[in-house]
Amino acid sequence: FLAVVIALIGAALLTTPRPDDIRGCLTAKMHNIRLCPTEASYVKLKNISPHIRNAVLVSEDGGFYDHKGIDFYELRMSFEENLKEGRFARGGSTLTQQLAKNVYLSGEKSLIRKAREALIALQIEKILSKDEILERYLNVVEFGPKIYGVKQASSFYFGRAPSEVTVLEGAWLAFLLPNPTQYSASFRKRELTRFARTQLQTIVRRMARFQRITRDEEALALAQLENMFKPVEELIDPALEAELNQNTEGGEIEATESPSALPTEEPSSPDETSPATEEL
């Protein structure tokens, strides 16, 4: 058994990317997406609205700027929940781990893949700055069927550049991340589901609680919920809409693997806030 474990660790180490591969241009393995900081399709972090960045951080990885690639608290909680459920019910992945999975691995759910993901995340953290990691993540992550990166997502959902995205729109993009295909059902229907509305409210309120937006901005964003996606007909690419309709026939379901899944209602006190967001 020990020999098998050592062999697996050795194989994982041999397949981790080299520093030049991490810094350079490449094609992401998960969705075959080109990721190159020097190309026109790539959006620099300074040109991405702070509302997108902050919404993603408070909903996906509150301790991003403090951890070294792995959030061991979330990892332990995920292990305990998965053991209890007898399946991969909770991911526990940081943004760095998600980047590692999207760029270098597959969507396979296995202990070997999770081990490789962790090793690659640690290596990425040694080579790239936190801002570079967040920048690459936002340029490659999926926001819906065949919608990858903030540039395409901002254009598809809102008809605007990533730099122009509002508080509520940033919360929407962050909301999509755990399960982009299913969670984008509200956009297809032109009306927020109850689950989507609750999650968006939670993200916006977290942004205000951690002083990422003002209370006035929070109030405005929550008031805009009623008219979200109305009208949007002129913004929709017919081909992408057809793909969206095809992939969301089953309606909206909750994610099965979310690094720090949002609660279905706002915690009543700071003590009830998830540990992942307390570090913000």
Image (cartoon, rainbow, N blue to C red):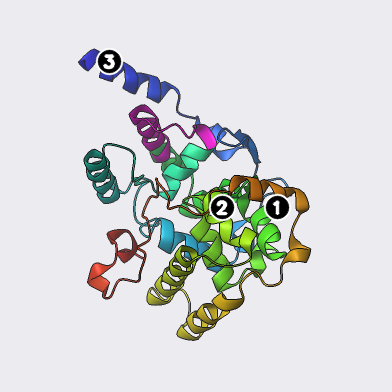
Q: Residue at x 50, y 86 (%)?
A: 216
For disc 3, the marked residue is: 4
Which numbered disc, 3 or 2, marks the residue that appears first in the sequence? 3
Q: Main secondary structure of the magenta part?
A: helix
Q: Secondary structure at mark 2?
A: helix
Looking at the rendered structure, the kind of residue marked 2 is Leu
Residue nearer the viewer, 210 or 241: 241
Considering every residue shown, the one lying at the far bottom of the view is 216
The label nearer to you, 1 versus 2, is 1
For disc 1, the marked residue is: 241
Which numbered disc, 1 or 2, marks the residue that appears first in the sequence? 2
- Other-residue count near label 1 (Cα within 10 Å), few / some / many at <14 / 14–19 / ≥20: some
Measure the C-alpha gap from mark 3 to mark 2.
37 Å
In magenta stretch: residue 112: yes
224 w.r.t. 52: above or below? below
* Image position of 201 (left or right of 250): left
Q: Position of residue 33 (x, y in %)?
A: 64, 39
For disc 2, the marked residue is: 138
